[in-house]
Image: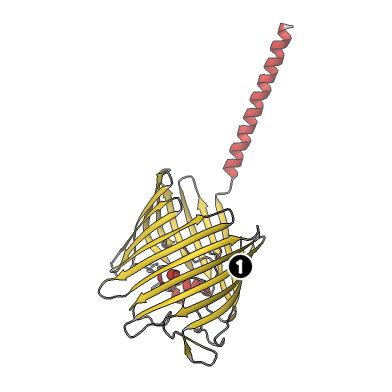
């Protein structure tokens, strides 16, 4: 009887050992064959119409970036190839179409000859707490981004439009623990993304805590401080916030703005969001086109944008109505007379993959 017990125990032990060995080998094989390359992106198009102004001129539109074209219009195709290794990786983010062209508007040379690079960088995870990124990356300032997939509102804010879009340089991200993070960067001057034709450099910094970020940027005599964050007030209700101030030396102009983003999830597939923004400039590079300015170069605008977001699989449909009200007569009405306000509607379709 004793011999039989030992024999059964030996068989059970050998079977368990074989099972563990096979399981480990399968797991290792699955890990080794797990794709490290990824391919993602989005495609978007929209229809936009003025309610209080003619629709036969491109320039009769809100003075913020993107979504400015009349009638049925194209956004962009965004193609992102990435490699994520254990320690190193890269991102190649390419854009095609009007929105993509606007996103790289200040490229000093190659945008005129077909530049399509939105982001192009390599990174090294030096440790669990430190990551170095080298190349061209989208800005760390602000609540909104270039890709329409990550924004609730399809049209963009004045804060986003006046701030930098992208930087080229070296940045270091630090995980400080307990939900704290930090970032330091040395970069080309703002929006000079292919090379540095000036010999000057910009410096940036960020301090983050639990989804709230305080950002700093100094570039070519201009200093910007920016706060970006948000709070889940309930399971259905989220409130985002962006506030920024920019000031340039030697009377180069300034801007100050604040935007609130209350968003409410009506159901699992439909949400409503309002962007309420107040934005003002002080002789900002003599810019009167975006919001209008008085004889001293000062201007301000209040912009209210109500957006619905309906999800159908990987497709997002966004109906939107927007009212821009300027302190100056920055717009025209249907009789071609100067006016202080513009009402417009928009419908966008965004597919992400």
Q: Residue at x 44, y 63 (%)?
A: 242
Q: Is residue 24 above or below residue 93?
A: above
300 to 179, vertically: above or below: below
The residue at the far left in this view is 250
Q: Percent from the top left, x then y, of residue 296?
A: 31, 83
Q: How many marks?
A: 1
Q: Is residue 251 visible?
A: yes
Crowding around mark 1 (Cα neighbors within 10 Å: few <14, some 14 to 19, many 20+) is many
| Residue at image location 49% in from the left, 47% down from the top | 85
Spot occupied by residue 292 in the image (x, y as percentages of width and height)? 41, 82
Residue 212 position by quadrant: bottom left
Q: Nearer the viewer, residue 197 or 191?
A: 191
Task: Identify the image quadrant of the N terminus.
Answer: top right
Quadrant where the C terminus sits is: bottom right
Q: Quick one: SS at disc 1?
A: strand
Residue 238 position within the rendered picture, expressed as x and y whole percent measured from the top left:
54, 58
Pick whichever, 50 or 203, lies toward us: 50
Is residue 173 in sight in this rendering? no
x, y (%) of residue 277? 46, 70
Question: On the image, which quarter does residue 12 sit in?
Answer: top right
Q: Nearer the viewer, residue 290 or 20?
A: 290
Residue farthest along the top direction in this orientation: 1
Q: What's the coloring here?
A: secondary structure
Q: Quadrant of residue 166?
A: bottom left
Disc 1 designates what residue?
Answer: 308
Residue drawn at 47 percent across, 79 percent down: 325
């Amino acid at each position: 009887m004793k011999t039989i017990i030992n024999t059964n125990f030996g068989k059970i032990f050998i079977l368990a050992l074989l099972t563990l060995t096979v399981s480990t080998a399968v797991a290792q094989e699955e890990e080794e064959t797990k794709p490290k390359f990824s391919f993602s992106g989005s495609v978007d198009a929209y229809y936009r119409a003025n309610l209080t102004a003619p629709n036969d001129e491109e320039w009769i539109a809100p003075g913020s970036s993107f979504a400015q074209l009349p009638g049925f219009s194209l956004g962009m195709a965004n193609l992102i190839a990435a490699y994520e290794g254990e320690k190193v990786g890269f991102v190649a983010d390419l854009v095609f179409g009007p929105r993509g062209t606007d996103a790289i508007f200040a490229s000093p040379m190659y945008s005129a000859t077909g530049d399509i690079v939105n982001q192009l960088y390599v990174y090294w995870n030096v440790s669990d707490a430190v990551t170095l990124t080298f190349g061209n990356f989208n800005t760390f300032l602000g609540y909104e981004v270039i890709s329409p997939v990550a924004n609730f509102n399809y049209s963009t804010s004045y804060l986003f439009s006046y701030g930098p879009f992208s930087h080229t340089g070296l940045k270091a991200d630090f995980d400080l623990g307990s939900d704290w993070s930090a970032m330091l960067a040395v970069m080309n001057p703002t929006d000079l993304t292919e090379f540095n034709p000036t010999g000057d450099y910009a410096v940036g910094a960020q301090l983050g805590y639990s989804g709230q970020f305080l950002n700093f940027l100094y570039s070519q005599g201009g200093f910007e401080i920016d706060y970006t964050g948000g709070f889940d007030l309930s399971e259905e209700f989220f409130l985002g916030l962006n506030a920024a101030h920019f000031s340039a030396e030697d009377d180069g102009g300034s801007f100050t703005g604040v935007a609130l983003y209350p968003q409410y999830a009506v159901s699992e597939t439909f949400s409503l969001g309002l962007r309420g923004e107040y934005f003002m400039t002080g002789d900002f590079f003599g810019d009167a086109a975006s919001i209008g300015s008085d004889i001293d170069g000062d201007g301000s605008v209040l912009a209210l944008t109500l957006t619905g977001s309906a999800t159908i699989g990987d497709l997002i449909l966004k109906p939107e109505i927007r009212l821009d009200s300027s302190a100056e007569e920055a717009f025209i009405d249907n009789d071609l007379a100067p006016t202080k306000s513009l009402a417009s509607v928009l419908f966008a379709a965004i597919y992400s993959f």
